[in-house]
Image (cartoon, rainbow, N blue to C red):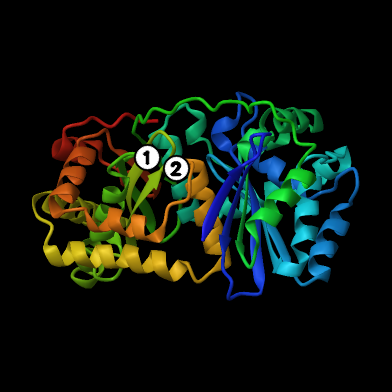
Amino acid sequence: MTELTRLPSGLTVVTDSMAHVDSVAVGVWVETGTRSELEGEHGIAHFMEHMAFKGTANRSARAISEAIETVGGEINAATSVETTAYHARMLTEDLPLALDIFADILTEPAFDPADVERERHVILQEIGAAEDIPEDRAFDALPEAAFVGQPLGRRILGTRASVGAVSPDALRAFFEANYTAPSMTVVAAGKVCHDRLVDSIARAFERVPTRAARTAPAATYTGGAMAESDDASECQLIFGFEGRAALHDDAVVAQLAAMVLGGGLSSRLFQALREERGLVYDTSAFHWAFSDSGVFAIHLATSPEDVAEARTVVLDELESAIATVTPEELQRAKAQLRAGLLMSRESCNARMGQAARQAIVFGRPVSKEERIAEIEKVSDTDVRRLLSEVSRSVPTVVTVGSADAFDAATITARFGAEVPAV
């Protein structure tokens, strides 16, 4: 059973009880990410995530990691466009320790100048590692091309220049502006008692400021084209269109449309690109739903000499799906989403993440029955309509590899929307 309580401070507490397990996954989701950054703060949300574990007024970085690992637990964090999550997993008997550590790092981070310099070097190494992987570069460029000049489009890691400019004072200012009780959701999934957790959170997080956090600016999908040269043997291509926001009625329709096009070995794109023509090793379609916008996209990697043919096949399959989606295809896509949902519920970590997203996006728990009902009510007409609508939006095209792999005229001729260069 999933339960939700909002404390007088504005902090939200969610539990998903799993009586058959002996452990618990617990995390604090802060509703701040890349899109919360002001001009001059690019990469600071991710930098803040790193610094949370580098020491507080009460614990050193080593003391934090040793405390968790001494009881056999694990702790980590992740930054996304809209949230930053700090999470851990341990035996239920050690849950109070995790809560104490989270309350410590999220109320009294030290931001010691020496630690900031050391972590800056670590993040620069992380940026370098991402730059060495063409696929990562393509996916990092996608939101930048889709939301030109907007915080939502910024690369999460930042740039070498922006990371180099982050100071301890800037980190503290970002922390104070964004890490407040109304922006925090504490979630636990596993062997946990909701009422006891609520009482523990109320005590442990009583020092968190209750003021409202900074409001992230609204996003407007623009579409665009980005091309980066690379001497890799394959060229990375992403074709994107305007998607749907997380609360849009068509958000689930977009997920199913992505499954029909590129969700698995039996999908249209995998069959057409790999099985029938041998043009790719792998391909996929996906939908990113943000709070107020979204991106529907197709990814593939192929040799430079096969780019033109692969691009034509992708556009052909998209047009074909707009015309016809068979009952078998739609049922297969529904089965994939349904099975993925139900199988993920066997994991404490997965259920923690799902409960956090539901609390933040919907403001309430959403039962598996409700989610399955949303999937089942989608018709082939809904999928074809969605694909027709998104394909008429301004495309977003990202190319990493051959600089001349992108041909704007091809997209314009197919869908009638001119692609601006970024």
Q: If you read the primary sequence from the N terminus, does the residue marked by circle 1 or circle 2 appear first?
A: 1
Left or right of 114? Residue 360 is left
- In the image, 33 versus 2, the foreground residue is 2
Q: Position of residue 64 (x, y in %)?
A: 83, 57
Quick one: which residue is furthest to the left in this view? 323
Residue at x 29% of width, y 41% of height: 249
* Residue 305 appears in the figure: no
Gap between marks 1 and 2 measured at Cα? 7 Å
Residue 247 has which mark? 1
Query: Which one is closest to the eye, mark 1 or mark 2?
Result: 2
> Label 2 is placed on what type of residue?
Phe
Helix, strand or loop status at disc 2: loop
> Label 1 is placed on what type of residue?
Leu
Helix, strand or loop status at disc 1: loop
- In the image, 200 versus 394, the foreground residue is 200
Residue at x 52% of width, y 62% of height: 350
Q: Position of residue 22 (x, y in %)?
A: 66, 74
Circle 1 Cα neighbour tier, 10 Å, few/some/many (<14 / 14–19 / ≥20): some
Q: Are marks 1 and 2 in contact (CB under 8 Å)?
A: yes
Left or right of 371? Residue 41 is right
Residue 71 has which mark? none
Residue at x 28% of width, y 71% of height: 265
Report which quarter residue 88 is drawn in.
bottom right
* Residue 314 appears in the figure: yes
Q: Position of residue 279 (x, y in %)?
A: 26, 65
Residue to which mark 2 is pinned = 362
- Up/down of 221 relative to 138, above or below: above
Circle 2 Cα neighbour tier, 10 Å, few/some/many (<14 / 14–19 / ≥20): few
Report which quarter residue 325 is drawn in.
bottom left
- Up/down of 46 relative to 321, above or below: above
Residue at x 56% of width, y 48% of height: 4
